[in-house]
Image (cartoon, rainbow, N blue to C red):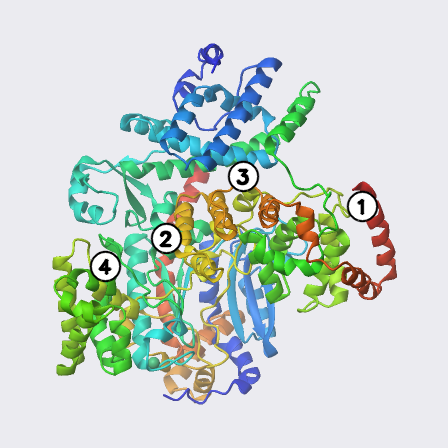
């Protein structure tokens, strides 16, 4: 798929247009203001901008939506990151006594990056993605979204495409925003199953009994595994990938359970049994080329092990999880003051807008169909339809100038392929607004009591 | 223990109910007047006891039978003494952390010793209003509860009470997936509730200790108490390793090799990252800088050491002198309030200022991901069985014992003859072992080439000479510094 006609050299020309006419400022402010329930919540929020030539400015903050708009239109950031809500205005952090300027709250965030899966995808590596490996992101979203809602009880989850090779999740519930560093790291660790770096071969080890959270996650993984791993990645096709899978079958267990039965072979070979069993499986694989059937053979082995050994053996589950389970960057989730790329920021390398992902259409979400900044700016230049013209006349008549400018912007993004993503964002905000309405009501009730 | 009569005396006041309970949270300071003699006796006994427990914890594995027996014998005296502490007796120094860990241990033991009914009473008395789930709910969740805990060997879910607790109150159990989690609540079997109570206890204890620190002036103003307090804080907190008798015994060239041989893991880790990144953030500079000062680096050496490393990175000499030299002189008490800072103890490293992203300070046994620590230990050639022992100690939150085990393994000693509580102590003990009982001085002198050393030292001067004013100032400070020492 072509990265359309995007060229990063043209960013200085089109960013002003994007921030003037397309960036959804009012939704953006509505989100980060959280209904104004807490004082200075928006004002004390850190933004950081990456400007041309990788100039990085931290600790930007804004008092109003208007100021945010003005500044962004002035600075035209290549990239926007969102940080924490601090004890003081971040742009005044130098003026407060050292030690008193502290990060207080932030959404609980998750960052899933395709580069962390390089050892289990054969289609691409590093920053590349393709429709085959994108399934990993779909799985990650399904697994984490379920756990964050069902297990942790969070409700306001905003999933965002990073613009290049991953996804982010912003958990916006009040309780999530208030979590301590320790709590964030506990949540992230609860959700982490794949452990160990390049040196560790076996990265998932399950203990008995299998925790309900892992069971639920397995339900998701099992749904995608045949199509993703067996077909698209063909992990039981080519020899080297087959070897990789076989390396994950438990050698010591195989050795222990079979050593007596095969003692004659044992004498002939120094570490014979797992080899003989593995070669059994390998022989079976010789006769059976279809990946699905090969997988069934492996599952049969696992079942047999489970029946004979006292302790649970779950190596087929461990293999599935190692290949498919979401890999989190725990450090991003842990820190309250950690910055994360903002929704609707441009990805400077690909030009794609960081857009919210509609989970109702997750299966068909196509990262390559996400509009680039050049694409939507071009769409603005297309001649308006008669219908659009009529509408705009009408509204300008009715409203004063400032509102007119605002509504022009609304009409602007609606004329581009950004529209459906902004709509998804709107829906997310509508649901969340109901929760803070309740809080505001409670607050005003309390005040009446006094 | 002979405090029984006094304890009785105080069980007649209005707070009887709370205090007579075998367990006690640090909620309120004592309200009664006590005599100075009583105060002194209790305070000394208390500190002795805490010190005993700390040492016990090292020599027996914590919570072994003997340990518990010893604790049991001493624990009667504690009820009243808990309260005398809140008068501000314990100075806000090393003893605070000593009190902290031992109190937590003591508390854990005492709580475990209660009957289930008493535990429940205790929870409610201390505003931990966690409810147990109904029989119906338990039935509905039966399978999930069973598969959420591997601690259920033999005990069926039916016989257990389960508490429903907000997950934020049970982070350790959440982290390890040791409990069932649903809609933001964890379901904790009765036998695991201690984890929660301990968390709560830690929070309250920290708060109480902070309060204690704040109430200090009131006690200090009583001149009769002052000598006693001074005495106590010196006698029981332990050595602070700030004395500068060993200044100049170490040359900068030795640091790399010493870091591999005699530095505790925390310092080795900081040193390595400093060499790699040519930079260290504040937390690392403080922890490592004071440690180096403690092993004998002079201010001049320290300035040279940090400058030469930093200017290999993004900091030029000018910026170093402007931005960093001050804080190094500060460490040596040459700037600001002129406090002569003491090297951090293990407790301070473990409990305060946990490292975040990009930091290398802290205690690797406490703050590293066990998996990463394991890899690091492998790189440092610790045997697989040794690694298992260390990880086991970490699991039980015995970070200092883990470090001591690391010492034993890397120095080939069966059982260390000391109980580790300070990185500088680690260094000294290591040098002792490496010297094979010989005089420490000879060992550290041995690899040092005096001539080379003396030519190296002035070579730093041209760099510093960029600002002659500074040099003059520094020599002046150095002079006074050496006079002090
Ligand atoms: Zn791919």
Task: Find the distance from the CA under tag 4 to the CA under tag 3.
Answer: 50 Å
User: What element does badge 2 sit on?
Assistant: helix
Location of residue B133 with respect to A194 vertically, above or below: above
On screen, residue B93 versus residue B247, left or right, reads: left
Q: Name the residue rendered at 60%, 33% in the picture.
A: B237
Q: Which chain contains the residue that carries disc 4?
A: A
Location of residue A136 with respect to B460 vertically, above or below: below
On screen, residue A418 versus residue B292, left or right, reads: left
Residue B212: x percent and y percent?
57, 30
Q: Which residue was labeled with disc 2?
A: A435
Q: Nearer the viewer, mark 4 or mark 2?
A: 4
Residue neighbourhood size for the residue with mark 2, other residues' Cα within 10 Å, grouped as few (<14), some (14–19), many (≥20): some
Task: Find the distance from the CA under tag 2 to the CA under tag 3.
Answer: 58 Å
Q: Earlier in the sequence, mark 1 or mark 3?
A: 3
User: What element does badge 4 sit on?
Assistant: helix
Q: Nearer the viewer, mark 2 or mark 3?
A: 3
Q: Which residue was labeled with disc 1?
A: B481
Q: Quadrant of ligand 1?
A: bottom left
Q: Do badges 4 and 1 share one subunit?
A: no
Q: Which residue was labeled with disc 4?
A: A216
* Displayed quadrant of residue B110: top left
Task: Find the distance from the CA under tag 4 to the CA under tag 2.
Answer: 28 Å
């Amino acid at each position: 798929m072509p990265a359309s006609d995007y060229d990063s050299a043209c960013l200085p020309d089109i960013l002003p247009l994007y921030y003037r006419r397309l960036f959804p400022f009012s939704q953006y402010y509505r989100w980060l203001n959280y209904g104004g329930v807490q004082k200075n919540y928006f004002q004390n929020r850190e933004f950081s901008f990456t400007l041309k030539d990788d100039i990085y400015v931290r600790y930007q903050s804004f008092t109003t939506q208007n100021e945010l708009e003005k500044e962004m239109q002035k600075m035209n950031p290549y990239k926007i990151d969102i940080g924490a809500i601090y004890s003081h205005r971040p742009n005044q952090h130098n003026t407060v006594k050292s030690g008193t300027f502290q990060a207080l709250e932030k959404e609980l965030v998750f960052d899933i990056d395709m580069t962390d899966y390089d050892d289990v995808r054969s289609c691409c590596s590093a920053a590349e993605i393709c429709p085959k490996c994108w399934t990993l992101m779909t799985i990650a979203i399904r697994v984490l979204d379920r756990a964050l809602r069902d297990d942790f009880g969070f409700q306001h989850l905003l999933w965002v495409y990073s613009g290049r090779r991953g996804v982010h999740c912003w958990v916006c519930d009040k309780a999530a925003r208030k979590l301590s560093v320790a709590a964030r790291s506990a949540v992230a660790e609860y959700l982490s199953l794949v452990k160990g770096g390049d040196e560790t071969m076996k990265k998932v080890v399950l203990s008995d009994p299998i925790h309900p959270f892992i069971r639920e996650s397995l339900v998701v993984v099992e749904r995608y595994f045949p199509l993703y791993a067996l077909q698209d990645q063909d992990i039981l096709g080519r020899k080297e990938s087959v070897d990789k899978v076989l390396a994950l079958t438990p050698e010591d267990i195989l050795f222990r359970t079979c050593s007596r039965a095969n003692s004659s072979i044992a004498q002939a070979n120094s570490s014979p049994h797992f080899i003989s069993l593995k070669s059994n499986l390998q022989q079976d694989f010789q006769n059976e080329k279809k990946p699905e059937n090969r997988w069934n053979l492996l599952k049969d082995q696992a079942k047999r092990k489970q029946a004979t050994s006292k302790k649970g053996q779950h190596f087929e589950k461990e293999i599935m999880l190692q290949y498919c389970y979401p890999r989190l960057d725990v450090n991003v989730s842990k820190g309250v003051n950690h910055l994360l790329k903002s929704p609707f920021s441009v990805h400077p390398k690909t030009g794609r807008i960081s857009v919210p992902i509609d989970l109702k259409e997750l299966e068909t979400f196509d990262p390559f169909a996400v509009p680039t900044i050049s694409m939507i700016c071009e769409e603005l230049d297309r001649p308006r339809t008669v219908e659009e013209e009529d509408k705009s006349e009408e509204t300008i008549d009715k409203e004063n100038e400032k509102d007119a400018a605002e509504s022009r912007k609304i009409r602007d993004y609606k004329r581009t392929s950004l529209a459906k993503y902004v709509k998804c964002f709107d829906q997310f905000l509508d649901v969340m607004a109901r929760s803070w309405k309740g809080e505001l009501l409670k607050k005003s009730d309390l005040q009446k009591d006094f | 223990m002979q405090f029984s009569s006094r304890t009785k005396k105080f069980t007649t006041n209005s707070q009887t109910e709370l205090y007579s309970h075998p367990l006690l949270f640090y909620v309120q300071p004592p309200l009664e007047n006590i005599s100075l003699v009583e105060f002194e006796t209790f305070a000394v006994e208390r500190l002795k006891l805490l010190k005993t427990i700390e040492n016990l914890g090292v020599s027996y594995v914590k919570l072994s039978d003997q340990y518990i027996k010893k604790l049991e014998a001493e624990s009667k005296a504690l009820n009243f003494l808990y309260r005398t502490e809140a008068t501000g007796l314990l100075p806000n120094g090393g003893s605070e952390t000593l009190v902290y860990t031992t109190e937590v241990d003591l508390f854990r033991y005492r709580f475990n010793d209660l009957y289930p009914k008493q535990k429940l009473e205790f929870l409610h008395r201390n505003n931990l209003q966690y409810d147990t789930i109904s029989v119906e709910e338990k039935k509905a969740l039966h399978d999930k509860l069973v598969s959420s805990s591997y601690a259920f060997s033999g005990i069926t879910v039916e016989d257990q009470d389960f508490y429903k607790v907000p997950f934020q109150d049970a982070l350790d159990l959440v982290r390890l997936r040791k409990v069932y989690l649903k809609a933001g609540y964890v379901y904790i079997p009765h036998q695991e509730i201690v984890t929660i109570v301990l968390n709560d206890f830690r929070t309250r204890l920290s708060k109480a200790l902070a309060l204690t620190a704040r109430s200090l002036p009131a006690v200090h103003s009583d001149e009769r108490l002052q000598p006693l307090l001074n005495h106590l804080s010196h006698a029981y907190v332990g050595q602070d390793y700030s004395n500068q008798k060993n200044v100049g015994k170490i040359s900068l060239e030795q640091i790399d090799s010493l870091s591999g041989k005699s530095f505790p893991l925390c310092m080795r880790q900081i040193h390595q990252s400093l060499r790699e990144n040519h930079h260290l953030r504040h937390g690392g500079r403080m922890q490592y800088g004071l440690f180096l000062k403690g092993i004998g680096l002079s201010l001049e050496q320290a300035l040279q050491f940090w400058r030469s490393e930093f200017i290999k990175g993004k900091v030029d000499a000018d910026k170093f002198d402007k931005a960093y030299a001050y804080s190094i002189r500060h460490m040596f008490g040459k700037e600001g309030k002129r406090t002569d800072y003491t090297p951090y103890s293990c407790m301070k490293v473990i409990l305060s200022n946990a490292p975040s992203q990009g930091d290398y300070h802290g205690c690797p046994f406490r703050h590293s991901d066990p998996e990463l620590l394991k890899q690091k230990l492998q790189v440092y050639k610790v045997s697989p069985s040794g690694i298992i022992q260390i990880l086991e100690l970490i699991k039980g939150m015995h970070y200092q014992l883990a470090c001591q085990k690391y010492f034993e393994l890397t120095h080939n000693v069966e059982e260390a003859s000391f109980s580790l509580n300070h990185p500088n102590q680690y260094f000294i003990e290591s040098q002792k072992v490496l010297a094979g009982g010989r005089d420490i001085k000879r060992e550290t002198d041995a690899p040092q080439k005096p001539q080379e050393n003396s030519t190296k030292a002035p070579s730093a001067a041209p760099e510093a000479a960029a600002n002659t004013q500074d040099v003059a100032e520094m020599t002046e400070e150095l002079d006074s510094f050496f006079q002090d020492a």
